[in-house]
Amino acid sequence: METEGGITVRRALELPGLRGGVPEVLTGADRLGRTVRWVHAGEAPNIPALLKGGELLLTTGLGLGSRPADQRAFVRKLADRGIAALVVELGPRFDRLPAAIVDAARTAGLPLVQLHREVPFVAVTEEIHTEIVNGHYALLQRAEEVHRRCTQAVLAGGGVPQVLGILADFAANPVFLETPDGRLLFAAGTGTGTGPVGAGPLQVWESLRGARAAREAPPAGAVLVEVPGGGPGAGAVRARLVLLAVSGPLVTVHRMAAERAAGILAVVLMQARQEEEVAARGRGDFLTDLAEGRIAPEDAPAQAGVLGFRPGGDPLLPVVMRLAPESAPSGSWAVLARAVADELSAVGAPVLVGVRPVEGRVPLLLALRPGTTRTVLADRVAAALRAGAGRAGLERAGDRTPVVVVVGAAGGWAAAGAALRHAAEAATAAHGLGERPWYDARRLDIDLLLWRMRDHPDLASFVDRAIGPLREHDRTSRPALLPTLEAYLAHAGRKAEAARELHLNRQTLYNRLARIGELLGTDLDDPESVLALSLALRARRHVR
């Protein structure tokens, strides 16, 4: 019988030490399967306070007291402490156990054993403790055997499914690998297939673990073991092993085996993530080489085919997602690459996606299938990219969107490189603009030109001349007037629309516009002045 690192009371009574005392079970014969985790011998009246539970207590009865009330109280206290059994050696103190002790033990459901012959308690203790240690060693051996089999499976080319399958067979129960937030990654059952969607285990998951409440409060008897991911803080947990007690109970040896399997899974996941990141970087390098003209258009289709991208004769749509510097993943980019690739799989078009950590970019090419417009595909791709960034933890509720998505012009392989380079540069220039699902690279040429001039002193001088007094006003006074000017110019001088966006009444808007004109010494109705102000507002993002 599985005793979770101990032996049963029945087994203890069968050992030579106690068997030599001619043991007689007076109460609790149906509970001799209790686990003995330790043996304690003592005669002190306060001995119950020294016990933690699971002990087999050896005594001659000197501490049991002489009054029936004291004896009953002593036995109740032992039962409350959760000891495995009480063994009393008959002799000078008792020639037979008093009825008060026997009745109290029977009422408490405590196994009570009397020994008719004297036994050396030290020898009994050593014997049982040796058996317990051997039991622990046997559990370790069984868990190590699982570890050995999992290691062999991985060395033979297996991965997560094989490790989970070995663990599920050992535990005779379904095993799951989930993300730290409770999303199911893999499932394995005994005698069933393994993988992300094993039919039998998946049904178990949905009924016992799928609901959010079940993830927060696991079913009784379940075993949860964290799979370490390395690094400090929350990033130290990459996944979680979940064993559910469906076909039978889960005991200590199952947890021990799961803990060893978790260590192997950590290595497997780390290796997979490294391989995935290397592959994603390789695709990013290809797209960058294409954009920089290091790959000839006639050679590009064959190289892209090696990377799994075969668009046929369809036009290619270049897209670049750029991350804000403070939002770029500090660790592996594989998490982001996988999340983006998973989301893009629902777009329904051939796609080649890579990562460029140095530039903080995710470049990609998509095939523009017949019947799909550039705008429709761009909408789908932008939504998928932002969803992938969210899954990778780069977007948080209430935060400003840390990604910019720019879509270039569609064309063949001959134009793909230049279009991809244009989209990448435009994505850099677009940071700081108002939030949109995606930007058309063709409409960002002015911003791109200003970005390319960002280090030229004339650009900073131009911004200072055009809106310097207004920026100085906003640093020292309220209300700030730059937002008013931006809204006014964004609506092409339509004051009613600008007032609605700013939630101002018209007179307040008129007063602010008059103040702006006064500070800048310009006429806001003059086209030349409006053009200069619009350029200055765009350029100020790029100058110090």
Image (cartoon, rainbow, N blue to C red):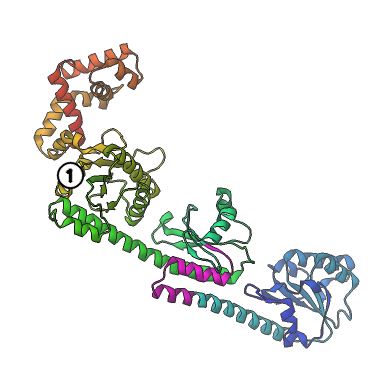
Image quadrant for the N terminus?
A: bottom right
The residue pinned by badge 1 equals: 419
Q: Could you say which is closer to the camera, residue 517 or residue 305?
A: 305
Residue drawn 70% across the image and 69% down it: 51
The amino acid type found where label 1 is placed reads: Ala
Residue 207 percent coordinates (x, y): 59, 54
Camera-side residue of 232 and 8: 8
Please provide the residue range marked out in magenta: 147-175
Give coordinates of residue 225: x percent, y percent.
52, 63
Q: Residue furthest top?
A: 507
Q: Is residue 156 magenta?
A: yes
Quarter of the image with the C terminus in it: top left
Q: Please identify the dominant SS of the magenta region.
A: helix
Whole-percent x and y of residue 447?
18, 35
Mark 1, secondary structure of its residue: helix
Q: Is residue 530 left or right of residue 111?
A: left
Residue 335 x/y as whole percent: 36, 55
134 relative position to 524: left or right: right
Query: Magenta stretch: residue 100 in it?
Result: no
Residue 200: name its quadrant: bottom right
Q: Left or right? Give the position of 467 relative to 341.
A: left
- Above or below residue 201? Residue 530 is above
Residue drawn at x 86%, y 79% is 93
